[in-house]
Image (tube, helix red, strand yellow):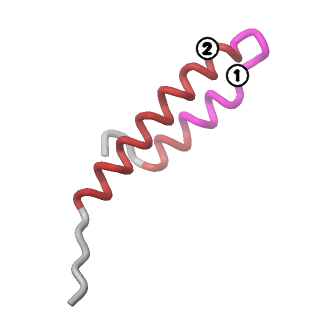
Amino acid sequence: MRYSWSQHVEAAQVLGSAGPADQGVALALMGAALLMLARDLLLEDSLVSVRCD
């Protein structure tokens, strides 16, 4: 992962506390952060393989 789970949570909290004047920028950054989280989770999931016999 590029970012740990706690770093993703911290970014969401910071962006969620944006004031009214900065909500548009915060929303755009939140979209980018969600894409990063999705990619990190996909990469993390692909590193773990489970085999059932």
Which label's residue is closer to the chain start, 2 or 1? Answer: 1
Please report the bounds of the magenta region as a residue range.
11-22
Residue behind mark 2: 25
Please say if 46 is above or below 48. above
- In the picture as drawn, the residue positioned furthest to the front comes out as 53
Q: Secondary structure at mark 2?
A: helix
Residue at image coords 34%, 50%: 42
Across and down, in percent, residue 51 comes to 22, 79
Seen in the image, is 37 located left or right of residue 2? Answer: right
Residue at image coords 26%, 57%: 46
- In the picture as drawn, the residue positioned furthest to the top comes out as 21
Is the residue marked by circle 1 packed among few (<14), some (14-19), or many (20+) residues within 10 Å? some
Residue behind mark 1: 18
Residue at image coords 55%, 44%: 9
Is the residue marked by circle 2 packed among few (<14), some (14-19), or many (20+) residues within 10 Å? few
Of the numbered discs in the image, which one, if any, rests on residue 43?
Answer: none
Foreground pick, 24 / 12: 24
Majority secondary structure of the magenta segment?
helix
Residue 1 shown in magenta = no
Foreground pick, 39 / 4: 39
Q: Amino acid at mark 2?
A: Val
Which of the 4 image quarters holds residue 31? top right
Q: Secondary structure at mark 1?
A: loop
